Amino acid sequence: MKKILPVCLSLLLPGVLSAQNRFPRPDFTSGYQYPDITYPVPNETLWTTVDILLLVLLMSIVTWAVLKKQTRRPILWVSVISVAYFGFFRSGCVCSIGSIQNIALASVDSTYALPFSVLLFFLLPLLFALLFGRVFCAGVCPFGALQELVNLKNYRLSRSLTTILGMIPWIYLIFALLYAVTRSSFIICRFDPFIGIFRLGGDLGLLLFGGLLLVAAIFTGRPFCRFLCPYGALLSLFSRISIWKIKITPKPCINCDLCRNACPVDAIRPPYENKVKESRPQGVQRIVNYLIILPLLIFAGAFLMRSVSSDLSRAHKDVRLYDLVVRHETNPQESLSLELEAFYGQGGTLEALTATFEQIQTDFRRYATCAGALIGLVIGLTLINLSVKRTRKHYEIDRAACVACARCFSYCPQNIENKKYTDERD
């Protein structure tokens, strides 16, 4: 035993000494300099280039499929590729939806360096929407693609319910902009319901919420895209005035109603020809009433949001810190939290923090007022849109709501006849 102990020590001692030499480094007096150690990192520039090229390629394939070929099969393959690459491989973080916040922050903060790739992911789908409609939503967006792949049934929701739920993306967008420009939080990324699914883990509540959305997507078309997605709200604006428009069939519509039954997002409007029409004075009077109410809604929204701006500002970390510091200054005998220890350890003072707090409150009052006015505008325009009865003799696509899924093409008898004729001719 006496011989074994020295042997063990002789074997362990060099390892212990070398372990101690690794951290912290000894202070040599001989002038020796440690060489710089570099570690290989992934070539993010390469992957970013691949992301952008694939984004453009997939949107181009969808455009070709819906405008030129009027077929759905390529869109299904695009959906699979998008879910596999942008979803699971890139962990759902190559995201046009979240880029809204980066753009908003860069517009008010000159010190924020906006990555060029983020700018492209924000602008390219909007550009395609302006030219060809919402081809990004068809299957290029991994969120929409995932919902599209699980959709089996399409139970139609009432028009009043979809109208009310359809305002949520706009309100979500407004709050996302509010918290981004005030440097408070990126709430789109924070409450992303699908990011946990793509990363195979995360917050349990968000995982459950994402799972519920997927279950709902089995029975009704794309609940997230229609009733939550803030980027979809922007795309609907550009798609409404798209230059090259998607058509159900190049041949005359025979009003068979099959296309509307096939549409999972209720984006095909039936004709009004067989409905009882109100008199023109009644319609004009109703629209005038809404136009009078619109400024009141805008003012009311601005007033209400300004009134609660102080409560909304507590999403900012410095406002929460100010509350902690004031509470501690009032009751100094309470134990310090980690936030307070860090604050006092860095030499922070209540006076400096108060100046920051007041500036944040000023920003929130200003931006919350604008946000409230926009919310009032959204509600007012939704009411006006409901009151406008456009004359339609045939089934037409609602450009703002259509997500270019191409389901309606194969249900149209005119397309089937046209395909048979083309096959026989070939």
Image: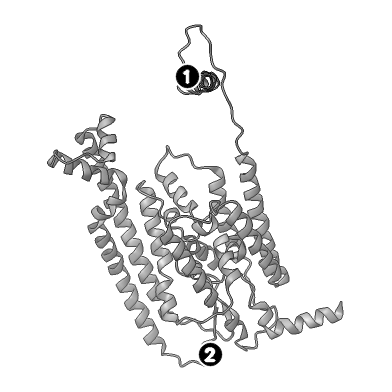
* Number of other residues with Cα within 10 Å of mark 1, as a class: few under 14, some 14 to 19, many 20 or more: few
Q: Do the numbered discs 2 and 1 sit on residues whose CB atoms are within 8 Å?
A: no
Q: At x 63% / y 64%, what residue is drawn?
A: 79
Residue 344 location (% of width, % of height): 24, 32
The single residue placed furthest to the front in the displayed view is: 1
Which kind of residue does numbered mark 2 sit on? Glu
Give the labeled residue for mark 2.
273
Q: Nearer the viewer, residue 282 or 58?
A: 58
Rendering coords of residue 335 (x, y %): 19, 40
Q: Work out whether mark 2 precedes mark 1 in sequence or the reverse, and give the earlier one.
A: 1
**Image: 297 above or below 38:** below
Residue at 61 percent across and 88 percent down: it is 255
Dot label at residue 426: none
- Give whichever of 340, 114 is nearer the camera: 340
Q: Is residue 213 left or right of residue 349?
A: right
On screen, 85 above or below 390? above
Identify whether 220 is placed above or below 189.
below
Question: Which residue lies under the disc numbered 1?
Answer: 25
Left or right of 423: which side holds 200? left
- The reply, left or right, for residue 280 in relation to residue 219 is left
* Element marked by disc 2: loop
Colouring scheme applied when the structure was drawn: one colour
Residue 303 is situated, as x and y percent measured from the top left of the image, at 24, 61
Q: Which-is-in-front pick, marks 2 and 1? A: 1
Q: Is residue 99 visible?
A: yes
| Position of residue 108 measured from the top left corner of the image (x, y, whole percent) | 39, 44
In the orientation shown, which residue stands out farthest toward the right? 426
Quadrant position of residue 75? bottom right
- Kindly tell me whether residue 242 is visible in this rendering: no
